[in-house]
Image (cartoon, helix red, strand yellow):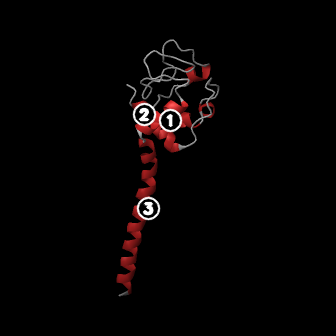
Amino acid sequence: MMGMKFGAACSVGSVALAATLLATSAAPVRAMDGDPIAGQAIFQRTCVNCHSLDVGVNKVGPSLWHIVGRQPASVQGFDYSDAMRGNKTPWDAAALDSYLADPRGDVHGVKMFFKGLPDAHDRADVIAYLKTAR
């Protein structure tokens, strides 16, 4: 009888452990999914003064049209810093997340004055919005 109680307790404990692991391992994936509508609002409030989503329209910063998947320092007509020209990591969601969290800490020597978006959900939302700029 004691074996049955222990076995049942292990099963319940295993299910609880599995549920906890699934919930915590899914959190980073959910954070990277983002909401493009919320991202548009953040972009309008935070990024639009320096960046455009129009093809070939550079401002203080380069156009961000089709940035997701693009090589860094690849927009024609924009004068990139040596640090950004040396950055060879394509702008996928993970690279954008790291850069948007702390631009100057991620790529030392960039011209971008912006301090970054500290909130992971805000970054995920902006990245989701940038994915729509194609």
Relative depth, front residue between 57 and 131: 57
Where residue 82 appears, x then y in whole percent? 61, 19
Where residue 125 appears, x then y in whole percent? 46, 39
Relative depth, front residue between 11 and 104: 104
Q: Amino acid at mark 2?
A: Tyr
Task: Report helix, strand or loop for mark 3.
Answer: helix
Which quarter of the rendering shows the C terminus? top left
Residue at image position (55%, 21%) is 61
- Label 3 environment density (alpha carbons within 10 Å; few <14, some 14–19, many ≥20): few
- Label 1 environment density (alpha carbons within 10 Å; few <14, some 14–19, many ≥20): some
> Which mark is nearer the camera, 3 or 1?
1
Q: Amino acid at mark 3?
A: Thr
User: Would you say 8 lies left or right of 111 here?
Assistant: left
> Which mark is nearer the camera, 2 or 3?
2
- Contact check, label 1 and label 2, Cβ < 8 Å: yes
Relative depth, front residue between 109 and 14: 109
Residue at image position (42%, 46%) is 29
Give the distance between the C-alpha atoms of the residues marked 3 and 1, in whole angstroms: 32 Å
Among the 4 quarters of the image, the one containing residue 1:
bottom left
Residue found at the far top of this picture: 77
Give the distance between the C-alpha atoms of the residues marked 1 and 2, in whole angstroms: 9 Å
Which label is found at residue 20? Answer: 3
Q: Report whether residue 93 is seen.
A: no
Upstream in the sequence, badge 3 or badge 1?
3
Task: Report helix, strand or loop for mark 1.
Answer: helix
Q: Report whether residue 13 is seen.
A: yes
What residue did someone put label 2 on?
Answer: 129
Give the distance between the C-alpha atoms of the residues marked 2 and 3, in whole angstroms: 30 Å
What residue did someone put label 1 on?
Answer: 42
Task: Report helix, strand or loop for mark 2.
Answer: helix
Q: Amino acid at mark 1?
A: Ile
